[in-house]
Amino acid sequence: MLRSAVAVIDELVPPGDAELDGQRAEELAGRFATVRPFLPRLMRGLAFGATPDGAPVLAAMRGLAEMITEKPGKPGARWLDAHRVDHDLIGGAWSRLVYAAGRPAETVDRAAYTFCVLEQFHRHLKHRNIFVEASSRWRDPRAHLLTGASWETAREAGLNALGLPHEPAAMLAEHAEALDTAYREVAARLDGDTPAAVDDDGKLHAAALTAVPDPPSLTDLRRRVEAMLPRIDLPELVLEVMSWHPGFTEAFTHASGNPARVADLGLSVAAVLCAHAMNVGFGPVTSPGVEALTRDRLHHVDQSYIRFDTLAAANTGLIEAQARIPLAQAWGGGLVASVDGLRFVVPVRTIHARPNAKYFGRKRGITWLNMINDQASGLAAQVLSGTPRDSLHAVDVVLRQQGGTVPEAIITDTGSYSDIVFGLLHLLGRQYRPQLANLPDQRLWRIDPAADYGPLDTAARGRIDVERIGRHWEDMCRIAVSIHTGEVSAHEVTRMISRDGQPSALGHAVAHFGRIFKTLHVLRLADDEPYRREIKAQANLTEGRHDLARRIFHGRKGEMTRIYYEGMEDQLSALGLVLNCVVLWNTVYIDRALTELRRSGLSGAGRGRCQNLAVHPNSYRHRWPLQLPPARSRRNTPAAARSRYSRRGLRASTGEFLGVARALDRHMPRDWDTRRISGWCSASTSGLFLGFVALVVPGHAHTVATQSG
């Protein structure tokens, strides 16, 4: 049967990629005219350096730049002198094209050799074997690791902070004992009442999780709590949260350091935050009748007060406030967090977006990788170009946290998983708990090759090389302390030691260290159902936050239209801040509702019940001021045009921001007149304005209707 299956596969699958690689190489060689102008300028304009592995490729690139700029000699412009090229770099599909049949003696094909070298140059640049020292992105991470006197100075404090020993023998012996115990305990329970099982091929399986139905009492509790929550607009919610925490507004300082603050800065900051979070621009939030909401004021506040560090400072206060609420403490202690990405289409031309047909169709996009803890607070985030593997950046997001309790356990999806990430996170003092797809195909690892684990022997076919870990322990600690102190990013280190699936010797050592904890994690996933439910619940909490982010970030079809990275980062940081405002507001009012229900004698309204059966802030939604009613006019009338633009999330009218009217009530006199109304919206939308006033500020509805006739 196996032989017949292999025969079928051989018929369906081509024997190799040589033909496809050859076609790709030919297509690349045909684009020589595209790279010819910039290649010499690239080598002249940037000062490249290289490690010993990348030095031959860099030398070949420099020689190639010289040959391209020279006037063609006797063989002709299509050929290069074979004595001046590096033949050791030519291989694979490029050999046939570089040594083309019928070429003049002692020459090679210029276009083919150029792309052959460029391909290897790009690969070594990704691994930082070739680097630009003056660049913050393409620098050599090895040069920024702690070395020499700096390493000796930071070693003791760094190892103590991370809980790492100078010598790993005793620690590795403890891990070996824990791993052996886990194997034997799971193997002993396989024939009993356990979700784990081993099939005939020796693969480890876990029974699928079944949904726990909500009891009628919980359904009634959720209905009662939701009915008690106020329904307000998003701008009003943000202003209310700002009024609870004066430090929120104080976190927004002027970029120049000037301590002077404009009048009603909080109102302007709230308007800018809502404009960014809802992706609607400043048009819907401007009001000529209110100084704090004029377009000039909003642009000034956006440019001078809204930036990454002020947004992070304001977010820190929200995280700490959330942690103090008893209901949030019932959900968790902030010691568990999850990292996942949210994709955004970028319809404008920018170097910071990448294509991915699965997520972006024919356009390009970015990923907003963010971390949320078990108290529903967003802790940190990072903007990534395209859809790179989360495993390259997950550690960086974990280390970007600036406030709140530091989580001990990190949960991700399968896309963030790798043995090296397991090793790095545990070196940095975190537990790593990824959701693993295809659990039976996961390879298990052992330290003792002679141990008998019964039915798990076949699954535990990998061996962890503790001697390799011991040989590289000094460098592993140096990497961990360098990342912990911020000398180098985890992304740079991961890319440097992983090399696209071909790890360096140090990368293999980190991976072997990570396989200890990966195997413990897989065994617990298969055997411990509450452990899996905890991971699934945290992942669902992250998905709920992403759904809420999509609902808020609805303008311009939910697409990111910023061109520069800093603009993308600032806007999505504002979105994250508004999300935390929504979560904090919901948590406060849910907690108050539960307190009131307990006072009224309702049984089952305890916070512990909400912890176990998921009454969460992401489950509730508010009224959104940008949901305009459909126009009843003809298609080509101005009113119909405004309605179409509103449905597309573009510019409708300034009346869209009237959700802030209640908060502005204290800034406006009681005797409004029609001139005030004309400052808010045009005559064609005055009826809509009156409807909003009646809904949001009932006390003014009759006055405005009377004065406007």
Image: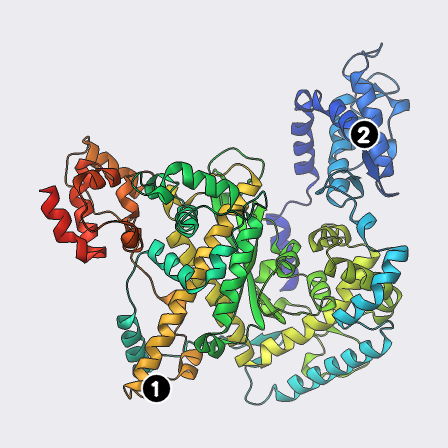
Q: Is residue 436 visible?
A: no
Question: Residue most toward the front?
Answer: 260
The quadrant holding residue 479 is: bottom right
Where is residue 371? Give x, y as percent: 55, 61
Q: Residue at horizontal 73%, vertical 41%?
A: 138
The three-letter code of the residue at mark 2 reads Met
Q: Could you tell me how far apart the alpha carbons at marks 1 and 2 are, in whole angstroms?
A: 72 Å
Q: Residue at horizontal 27%, vertical 53%?
A: 665
Tell me, for residue 604, which label it has, or none.
1
Residue 100 to residue 564: above or below: above
Where is residue 628? Give x, y as percent: 24, 47
Q: Residue at horizontal 55%, vertical 57%?
A: 313
Q: Nearer the viewer, residue 31 or 314?
A: 314
Q: Is residue 292 visible?
A: yes
The three-letter code of the residue at mark 1 reads Gly
Tell me, for residue 61, which label it has, or none.
2
Q: Earlier in the sequence, mark 1 or mark 2?
A: 2
